[in-house]
Image (cartoon, grey):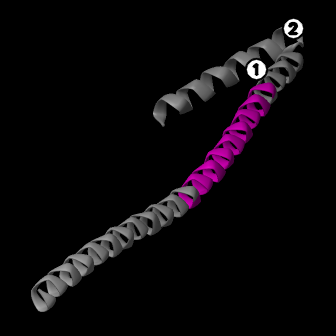
Amino acid sequence: MIQFDLFIRRTKKVYMNTASSSGGGASQVTEDIGDIHRTMTRTLNDILERGEKLNSISTRSEMLFSQSEKYRTTAHDLKMSVFYNRLKLAAVVLGSLSLVLFLRFYFW
């Protein structure tokens, strides 16, 4: 804070000396203000571009999240389908084996 105050005082002295000696101090101030304006404009444009990029990333992130949820439910459904198909196959095999054994020992 103190260094900044010192800088302001020195800059003020430079402008006062320039203004009183050559009468061109106002043009120097105008030029410096123009430089500051261009810098601020460039900085604000950079901030706006970053905001747009963040919005784009946010949109992509939401899209990936919804797709991952869809993938998760589809994977779960597929897993259950395979499980039930295997269960059906096991039931058919055990039923057939039970029938064969029943017929073998009951009728023979």
**Residue 23 in magenta stretch:** no
First of labels 1, 2 by sequence position:
1
Residue, x 46% and y 69% (percent of image)?
77
Is residue 43 magenta-colored? yes
Image coordinates of residue 81 in percent, x first then y, are: 43, 69
Q: Position of residue 3 (x, y in %)?
A: 48, 28
45 to the left or right of 72: right
Of all residues, the one furthest to the front in this rendering is: 108
Instruction: Compare residues 62 and 94 and report the one nearer the observer.
Output: 94
The residue that appears at 47% across and 34% down in the rendered structure is: 2
At x 66%, y 52%, the residue is 59
Q: Which residues are magenta?
A: 38-66
Quadrant of residue 100 within the rendered picture: bottom left
The span from disc 1 to disc 2 (Cα, nearest Å) is 10 Å
Q: Secondary structure at mark 2?
A: helix
Location of residue 106 (image quadrant): bottom left
Q: Around disc 2, counting alpha carbons within 10 Å, would you say few (fewer than 14), some (14 to 19), or many (20 or more)?
A: few
Give the side of residue 94 with respect to residue 79, left or right: left
- Dominant SS of magenta comes to helix
Q: Residue furthest bottom?
A: 106
Q: Position of residue 5 (x, y in %)?
A: 55, 32
Tell me the residue at 37%/73% (across/down). Answer: 84
Judging by the rendered image, the residue that carries numbered circle 1 is: 16
- Count the marks: 2
- What numbered label is drawn on residue 22? 2
| Helix, strand or loop under label 1 | helix
